[in-house]
Image (tube, rainbow, N blue to C red):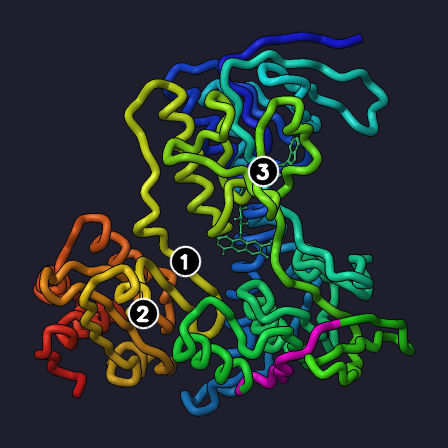
Amino acid sequence: GDIATGTDVVVIGAGPGGYVAAIRAAQLGKDVTLVEKNAYGGTCLNYGCIPSKAFVTASSLAHDAGNAEEMGIHADPAIDMAAMTSWKDGVVDQLTGGVEKLCKANGVNLMEGTATFADENKVRVGHDGEGQGSESIEFEHAVVSTGSRPVQVPNFEFDGEHILSSRDALALDAVPESLLVVGAGYIGMELSTVFAKLGTDVTVVEMLDSALPGYEDDVARVVRSRAEDLGVDFHFGEAASEWEEMGEGITVRTENADGEVSEFGAEKALVAVGRSPVTDTIDLDAAGVETNDKGFIETDDRARSNVEHIYAVGDVAGEPMLAHKASKEGQVAAEHIAGEPAALDYQAVPAAVFTDPEIGTVGLTEAEAEEQGFEPVVGQMPMRASGRALSMNESEGFVRVVADEPSGFVLGAQIVAPEASELVAELALAIEMGATLEDVAATIHVHPTLSEATMEAAENALGHAIHTL
Ligand code: FAD
C-alpha cells in the first residue's frame, strides 16, 4: 500500500534548477525532499552542458595539435573515441557524485522515483520497474524542475543508432565517418564543431536561412565561416522529411520551401532542433498548475506558478533554457519559500555557445536597445588587434559593447572570440552593477589578455580607443 510522509518542500527533478532549490531551502532550515527519477545533476551534468564541453575541449585539443605546423608542431593525433567517452563519463560521475554529497550534507532527503501531483498539496512517487507501490508526500511548497526533452522531428524517432539525440551523440564509442546534423541552433553547432574536429565529415541542414538563429548576423557569420573552414557543409532552407537505411548508413531526404527534395547520405544523423518542457507527464492538472501553449509553466518574479505555493524553475519555466538561469530561479524560489526577500531579474542573464570561436552575449543588442527607447552607442574591438588572440593563433571575432549614450550605462555585449564564455562575465557584472562605459574603460586589464578587448571596446564606444581605428 501507500507510504505517506510529509515535508515542507518537495522538489521534483534534480537538475541545476532543482538541486540548487533543494540545497538552498535546506540551508534556510526547511525540511526538503528532492525526488529524481534518473540521475542527479539532470540534463546539464549527465547529457548536456558538461559532457558537451568535455568533448569540445578534447576535440579542440586533438584538432589543434594536428594543425599546428605553422607553430612548428608536427603531430597526427589518433583518436580513441571509447577512451574519450569514458574520460567524459569520469568527469560527469565526479560532478553528479558531488551533487548527491552536497544534498546529503545539507540534510536534503533524497528520494528516487517518478513524482506526479495527486492534488495541490500532495505528490505521488512511483518506483517504476521495481513493481512496488507508490509513496505519497504531503507538502507545503513544491518546486517543479523537471527540465526539458529534445523536440522530435516527425519521422525521425531517436533510435540511438541511426537517428541520434544530443544525448546519444555524447555517448558514442567510435567517431562516425560522416554525420548529418539536423538543426543549426547552438546544440547542433557545438556538436558539428566537435565532430568536424574529430575528423567526421559533417553536413548541416537547417530549415531557416542561417546558422544560430537568434544571434546577430555578424556574430553567427564568424562561427559559421570557421565551421566551414573545419569542413562543415551547410544547407539552409532545408527541412528533413524522411530517412531510410542505406548500406552501412542512412539517406535523409529534405524539402525546401518550393517542395524540392534533396538527399543526403551519412553514417548517422543527429537531430537537434530544440527542446520542449517536461510538463505533460507530472499531472499538473491535479494541482491546478497551468501551462501556456508551448507547455511552459508561467511564473512571476518569485518563480511562483499560478498556484502560489507551487514554484517552477529552469527549463519548465521558459526561455532561455540555460543551466545558470535554472539555478538562479531555484535559488530565488527557495529563498522566497523560506521568507527571504528574493526576486528574479533577467536583465543580465549571459548566454554562451561553445563553438569555435565561442559566443558570449548578455543584455541588449544595439537593435533591442533602440526598441526599448535607449540611445545606443556601440564600441567594438576586433580580436585580430589583440596581442593575446594572435599569440593564441585564434584571432577571429570581436568584442562589442552596447551602452546608452546619454547616461553611459552598459546595456549589453556581444562577443565572438576565444573564451567568449568567460569574457562575457565581466560585462554581466557591469550591467548588474550599473557600470558605465567609463568604468569599464578606466579599469586596468592585464596585458596581454583577451579581456583587454573589453576595455578597448568600451574606449572605442567613447571615441578614444588606442588600438582600434
Ligand atoms: P534538467 O537538467 O533537465 O533536470 C530535470 C530533472 O528532472 C532530470 O534529472 C529528470 O530526470 C528529472 N525528472 C523529470 N521528470 C521527473 C519526475 N516526474 N519525477 C522525478 N524526476 C523527474 N545550458 C547551459 O547553460 N550551458 C551549456 O553549455 C549547455 N549545454 C547544453 C548542451 C546540450 C547537449 C543540452 C541538451 C543542453 C545544454 N544546456 C546548456 C541546457 C541545460 O542542460 C538546461 O538548461 C538545464 O539542464 C536545465 O536545468 P533544469 O533543472 O531545468 O532541468
- Residue located 82% across and 18% down the image: 132
Q: Mark 2 points at which residue?
A: 367
Callout 1–callout 3 Cβ contact below 8 Å = no
Q: Can residue 445 be seen in this view?
A: yes
- Vertical comparison of 405 with 302: above or below: below
- Vertical comparison of 434 with 416: above or below: above
Mark 1 residue CB less than 8 A from any atom of ligand 1: yes
Residue 436 found in image quarter: bottom left
Which span is picked out in magenta?
229-240
Q: Mark 1 points at which residue?
A: 351
* Magenta stretch: includes residue 236: yes
Mark 3 residue CB less than 8 A from any atom of ligand 1: no
Number of disc labels: 3
* Magenta stretch: includes residue 448: no
What is the three-letter code of the residue carrying label 3? Thr
Residue 52 point in image, percent of width and height: 57, 59
What is the three-letter code of the residue carrying label 1? Ala
Q: Distance between the residues labelled 1 and 3?
A: 25 Å
Disc 1, SS: strand
Taking the image as shown, residue 411 lies to the left or right of residue 174, namely: left
**Dot 3, crowdedness within 10 Å: few (<14), some or many (≥20)?**
many
First in sequence: mark 2 or mark 1? 1
Taking the image as shown, residue 32 lies to the left or right of residue 451, namely: right
